Image (cartoon, rainbow, N blue to C red):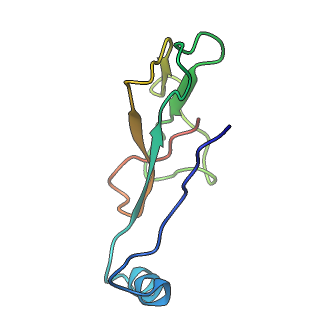
Amino acid sequence: YRVRCDSSPSTSSTFEDVADAIVSGRKQFAILNFWRNIDETPVRRVPLSIYSPRYDGDAAFPDAAPNVESSKWYMFPNATRDEVIVFYQYDRERKQPSDLWH
């Protein structure tokens, strides 16, 4: 089985109110990913891997290719049910690096 929850609406605001505030620049938003092994045994095959690309200058994907010399791979072999891996998938704040490929 698979567990997945991509988003949930705010209980204090309607989705349209939040979307309007984001588009107008009054609110910042970020997308976080939470990964956890749901099996009893540690992950041995195909562990979660995250590529953290770095770019030259102010350019970013899809307008530029990553600089492979300064980019990094992160791997999480033998992840157990007791571990949670949290990372930014996207942050509207441009100074926050969040272009992570997994």
Query: Which quadrant of the structure image shows residue 101?
Result: top right
Q: Quadrant of the N terminus?
A: top right
Q: Position of residue 11 (x, y in %)?
A: 36, 79
Closest to the observer: 37 or 91? 37
Residue 34 in view (yes/no): yes
Whether residue 56 appears in this view of the structure is: no
Q: How far from the left and from the top, in percent, is residue 68?
A: 55, 26
**Is residue 89 depicted above or below 22 in this figure?**
above
For the point 56% across and 37% down, the residue is 66
Residue drawn at x 52%, y 30% as measured from the top left: 50
Q: Residue at x 44, y 26 (%)?
A: 70
Q: Using the image as rendered, state which of residue 49 and residue 8 is in the foreground.
A: 8
From the image, which quarter does the C terminus lie in?
top right
Query: At 46% across and 74% down in the image, what residue appears?
Result: 9
* Picture quadrant of residue 85: top left
In the displayed structure image, the side of residue 94 where residue 8 appears, left or right: right
Residue 95's x, y, as percent? 32, 54
Count of numbered circles in the view = 0
Q: Quadrant of residue 29?
A: bottom left
The percent coordinates of residue 53 (x first, y second) are 51, 35
- Tell me if residue 32 comes above or below residue 29 in the rendering: above
Query: Does residue 27 appear to the left or right of 81 in the view shown?
Result: left
